Image (cartoon, rainbow, N blue to C red):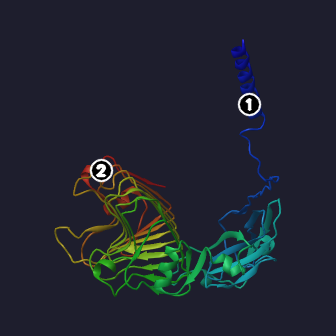
Amino acid sequence: MKRNKKSIIVTGAAVMLAAAMALGGGTYAYLQGTTKDVVNNFNTNKVLVTLEEKTGSNYNIIPGTEQAKDPKVTVDNTVDSYVYAIVTDNTNGLVKYDIADGWTLLNGWDGEHTKVYYREVTKDAAAKEFSVLAGDKVAYDAALENSDMVNPDGTLKDGLNLTFTAHAIQKDGFASPEAAFETAYTTVDTSTDLTTALQEGKTAVLTTDIALDNAYLNASGEVNIIGNGHKLTAPTNSPQKDNNRIISITDQTEPTTINIKDVDLVGPTTGAYTRGISVGQSKNVTINIEDSSLSASYYAFNFAFGNENVEINCKNTTIQGWAAMNIHTPNMKATFENCTLIGLNDKGYNEDGWNDFATVVVDNADGNPSATGASGGVFTFKDCRIEANQTTGNKQYFMSIRAINTTVDVENCTFFVNGEQIAATQEALSPYVSVYEEALDSFQFTIH
């Protein structure tokens, strides 16, 4: 009996110990405290700008009259902002206008053709609209005469235009409207400045003629050049491989876009196989040229083999070379509006026809039109002048179509051979359009 009682006592003690551990044994005390959350909220903001005209884009200059023209900038900004109106005037002084109230000429940006105006726009939840031109109109001086509107040869001046661009950027973080604007645009007056600006992704605005120093421009990404009517000339003091063109797009796999406005692009005048702008072994290339000129003693435009998805758009531009455009790239799209394309065959005479050429050459691949030459190209010419000139006895055609499935659409164009106008009909143009036999059945040539 005593043994059993002892067992009970031990058991009871174990239970008490377990209870003590459950109540206090194994817990620890610290000196500590916790605050409430302090939440930091970050608000997103926007600076959006658009430009729109509702009065159209084609105007007739009639002395002593005025016409409605209403470019308007709309800004949607939730922070205080600088807004800019970029005005490029290529009207030769024939069009008069005033800038609307509220815009101020940006210091340092009073170019020959391109001027920049700015205004400060306070943040607001609503979109705000600003006219660029006073009275939303342009006018024509009553003193204008015929002599003001014709060229020395008696033809009417063309390519006259007034262009507007809008740009906007936040105000905070910039010491001045000039500093803010120059994050995207910069003036250049040397070859080095031009190269640096393009490498930094800025729009380069020429303030003088520039001759490239050591090599042509290797273009990639987005390239924007505003010329103010100045020249950009190919290099002449570098090795031949680097001075035989102005701009080259080579071995580019990422999209490349070139925007050129109001630039006189002067290519090499000596040497073999010179180019103005060349594209080779590249994909997804777009070239936009407006109010400019492009020349080279061989090929103004040269599109070589190995390219994919290439498109060019030219307006109010003169293009001149042995060929204004020489193409080996398949499925190209090229549109020319109000352009002059001049082919000049001044190469040594060859009685076998090896130096016969054309203003527009849609080439094949190594003599095989069905191979990977310029097959499938679509070329549109609207309101253009196309010339074929020769000085040495070689034949110079308007077009030489050597690749299959080529489409050419011509609307309201004029054609000249050594200064003599040729009627814009299939019959009259036929002797000046060379089509290889293999490409003949698939060639589509439409004249409007």
Above/below status of 263 relative to 220: below
Q: Position of residue 277 (x, y in %)?
A: 40, 71
Marking on residue 275: none
Residue type at the position of mark 2: Leu
Q: In percent of the image, x 35 and y 49: which residue is there?
A: 405
Question: Which class describes the residues within 10 Å of circle 2: few (<14), some (14-19), or many (20+)?
Answer: some
Q: Position of residue 187 (x, y in %)?
A: 58, 82
Dot 1 falls on a residue whose secondary structure is helix
Residue 90 shown left or right of residue 314 in the figure: right
For badge 1, the amino acid type reads Leu
* Residue 152 in the image, given as x and y percentages of width and height: 51, 84
Which image quadrant for residue 94? Answer: bottom right
Residue at the disc numbered 1: 17
Residue at 68% of width from left, 76% of height from top?
180
Tell me the residue at 36%/52% (across/down): 406
Q: Which image quarter is the N terminus in? A: top right
- How busy is the neighbourhood of tag 1: few (under 14 within 10 Å), some, or many (20 plus)? few
Q: CA distance from mark 2 to mark 1?
A: 108 Å
The residue lying furthest to the top in this view is: 1
**Residue at the spot of label 2:** 440
Q: Secondary structure at mark 2?
A: helix
Q: Nearer the viewer, residue 255 or 373?
A: 255
Instruction: Answer yes or no: is residue 141 visible.
Output: no
Rendered location of residue 399, percent (x, y): 35, 62
